[in-house]
């Protein structure tokens, strides 16, 4: 098995999703099945093929560097679970 | 007299124009229809008060001679499009209660053209699914049923609420988004028409992101012409979306000339998949015959990398989703679960509680394929194969103008059919994903019924930014198919 429960734990940690031991087993099985299935891409010869980034052939245009929006602090904070003094509040980061 | 809910958008626009009824009347009739079809669970949020306000404003506008493309037409808005002051959830618990302070460009374009929003339609959580069964706010039920069988049928996904709602005549049209088939597959399952425009045609600004290089908004309606009207209102360049394309929007509404003489219709041999029901193959053959009868030339084409499209999609879409969904961290909006631990504990607890199973699975796959040591082997490999899929289409379009295929490999399935295998579920999108990866437009048209009486769709794909030819071909196919069957729900109500 390429994705064991330890790997699941590592991925879940990177993705910041808490997983229980039962879930680790479940995800290990499911992710292995999916990864095994997508392994079929190994059969495709892609030598010399550039990865496709955008399906639309366009270059980004330049715009004036100017302020077009702002002064909407109240709107920005409106949906936050916790705010104080015009800031988002998070659990203590520094002791 | 035909019930107002049975009218097409075009007929309703004519009726409004002639003064046969007002937008308020049309809207009220649809609000009543919604009330009597609650069991479909097509909406996450109903907005009857706003709808009536918009309808009233539209009637005033019309009286003053200002008539937009969708003036006074009641529609559903997929709950993935941000709407100022109206809860927008993406059908996820993590966004329950989220009230956007701005309106997405597509929704605004439609409002500017007179659309009346009846509510926010249900979908698979974050548009990840093909059955609408991953919604945190319950399954949507397809208004169609199998003959002599009362089992609930799925509407397809991810835009299940929009498709079911349009099919059930509780809205005249609706918005959807299509990442790998989320407009075309539910349109096929619900016996209606839906188009995924070319990537870049409709702005993604204010649409909750799933996979940014694939997501594309588009409409649902009951006719090809109505889709053209809807897309006319939705499409256009938007400088707030850097992938929106700065090209004039043609007049889609005049594209359905009915004439496809000499048009080259490509038939890809790779779309004959193992285990595809005989009736889908024969419907496809019927579609080919209809095209020939209308004077089109049938051309055999090859899209050699078709079988690699799904695994490619299931690397690229989860990779982009793992990155897009990193923003749901319990800090700026949405749910927060704080069990007294540190910041990381809060993130982990919030995301564990807020996301459903399929979303978590895709975030984990995405995180894995993007992680150190796997990036080249999976993510870059998939992007290289994607380029070859794109090349396949470009080669094909040297030989043909449009491509005709079935929309999905089966009719809609029942909710209690075995769907525990994610890969089996992913196969629903086998015919829709390739064009998504290549960014090309595609429409699904209801073309027949299966042996159980469920609708089946045919898909027409076109060249980038050539929605006009797609509409023109679809118009001819629609006329030939003459699909008049209606869902059992409608039949029962009429009885």
Image (cartoon, rainbow, N blue to C red):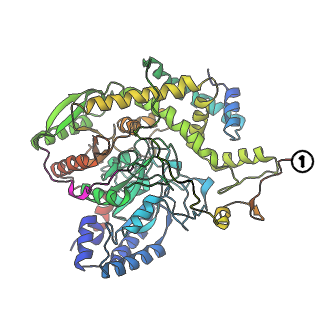
Which quadrant of the rendered structure holds the N terminus of chain B? bottom left
Q: How many marks?
A: 1
Task: Name the residue nearer the viewer: B27 or B116.
Answer: B116
Residue B190, given in percent of the width and then of the height, sits at 34, 52
The image quadrant that residue B265 belongs to is top left
Q: Is residue B355 left or right of residue B59?
A: right
Residue sitting at the far right: A95
Q: Residue at x 54, y 37 (%)?
A: B318
Q: Quadrant of residue B323?
A: top right
- Image coords of residue B152 (percent x, y): 41, 51
Which residue is rendered at x = 66% and y = 36% of the image?
A23
Q: Is residue B220 visible?
A: yes
Residue sitting at x 64%, y 66%: A71
Which residue occupies 19% across, 54% down? B256
Circle 1 marks a residue in which chain?
A
Residue with the mark numbered 1: A95
Apparent side of residue B422 relative to residue A75 in the rendered image (left or right): left
Q: Is residue B84 left or right of residue B156?
A: right
* Rendering quarter of residue B456: top left
Mark 1 residue crowding within 10 angstroms, few (<14) / some (14–19) / many (20+): few
In the image, is residue B249 part of the stretch drawn in magenta? yes
- Examine the rendered structure and indicate whether residue B107 appears above or below residue B439: below
B468 or A65: nearer the viewer:
A65
In the image, A94 versus B493, the foreground residue is: A94
Residue A65 left/right relative to B271: right
**Magenta segment boundaries in residue numbering:** B246-260
**Position of the C terminus of chain B by quadrant:** bottom left
Q: Main secondary structure of the magenta part?
A: loop
Q: Image height check: is B314 above or below B195?
A: above
Residue B155 in the image: above or below residue B83? above
Is residue B278 one of those drawn in magenta?
Answer: no
Does residue B272 appear in the picture of this structure? no
């Amino acid at each position: 098995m390429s994705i064991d429960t330890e790997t699941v734990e590592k991925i879940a940690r990177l993705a910041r999703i808490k997983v229980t031991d039962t879930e680790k087993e479940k995800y290990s099985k499911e992710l292995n099945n999916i990864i095994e299935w997508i392994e079929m891409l190994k059969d495709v010869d892609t030598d010399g093929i550039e990865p496709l980034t955008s399906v639309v052939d366009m270059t980004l245009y330049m715009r004036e560097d100017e302020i077009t929006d702002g002064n909407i602090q109240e709107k920005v904070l409106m949906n936050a679970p916790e705010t104080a003094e015009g800031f988002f509040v998070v659990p203590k980061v520094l002791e | 007299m035909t019930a107002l809910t049975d009218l097409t958008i075009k007929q309703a626009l004519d009726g409004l124009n002639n003064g046969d009824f007002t937008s308020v009347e049309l809207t009220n009739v649809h609000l009543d229809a919604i009330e009597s079809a609650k069991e479909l669970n097509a909406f996450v949020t109903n907005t009857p008060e706003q709808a009536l306000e918009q309808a009233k404003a539209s009637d005033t506008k019309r009286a003053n001679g200002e008539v937009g493309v969708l003036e006074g037409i009641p529609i559903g808005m997929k709950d993935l499009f941000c709407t100022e002051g109206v809860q927008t959830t993406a059908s996820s618990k993590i966004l329950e209660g989220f009230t956007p302070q701005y309106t997405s460009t597509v929704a605004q374009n439609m409002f500017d053209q007179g659309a009346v929003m009846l509510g926010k339609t249900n979908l698979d959580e974050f548009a990840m699914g093909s059955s609408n069964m991953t919604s945190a706010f319950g399954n949507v039920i397809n208004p169609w049923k199998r003959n002599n069988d009362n089992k609930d049928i799925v509407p397809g996904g991810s835009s299940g609420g929009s498709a079911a709602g349009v099919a059930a005549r509780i809205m005249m049209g609706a918005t959807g988004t299509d990442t790998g088939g989320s407009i075309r597959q539910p349109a096929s399952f619900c016996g209606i028409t839906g188009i995924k425009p070319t990537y870049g045609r409709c702005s993604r600004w204010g649409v909750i992101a799933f996979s940014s290089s694939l997501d594309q908004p588009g409409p649902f309606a009951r006719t090809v012409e109505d889709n053209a009207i809807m897309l006319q209102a939705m499409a256009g360049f938007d400088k707030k979306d850097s992938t929106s394309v700065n090209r004039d929007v043609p007049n889609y509404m005049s594209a359905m000339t009915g004439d496809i003489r000499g048009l080259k219709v490509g038939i890809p041999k790779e779309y004959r998949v193992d285990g595809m029901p005989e009736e889908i193959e024969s419907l496809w053959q019927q579609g080919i015959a209809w095209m020939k009868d209308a004077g089109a030339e049938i051309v055999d084409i090859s899209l050699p990398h078709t079988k690699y499209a799904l695994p490619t999609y299931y690397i690229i879409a989860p990779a982009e989703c793992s990155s897009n969904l990193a923003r749901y961290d319990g800090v700026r909006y949405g749910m927060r679960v704080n069990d007294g631990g540190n910041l990381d504990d809060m993130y982990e607890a919030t995301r564990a509680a807020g996301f459903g199973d399929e979303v978590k699975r895709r975030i984990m796959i995405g995180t894995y394929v993007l992680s150190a040591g796997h990036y080249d082997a999976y993510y870059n490999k998939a992007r290289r194969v994607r380029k070859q899929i794109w090349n396949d289409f470009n080669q094909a379009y040297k030989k043909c103008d449009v491509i005709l295929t079935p929309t999905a490999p089966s009719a809609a399935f029942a909710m209690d059919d075995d769907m525990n295998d994610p890969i089996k579920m992913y196969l629903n999108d086998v015919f829709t994903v390739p064009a998504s990866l290549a960014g090309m437009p595609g429409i699904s048209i209801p073309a027949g019924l299966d042996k159980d009486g469920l609708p089946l769709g045919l898909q027409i794909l076109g060249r980038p930014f050539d929605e006009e030819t797609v509409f023109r071909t679809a118009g001819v196919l629609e006329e030939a198919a003459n699909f008049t069957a209606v869902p059992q729900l409608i039949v029962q109500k009429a009885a």
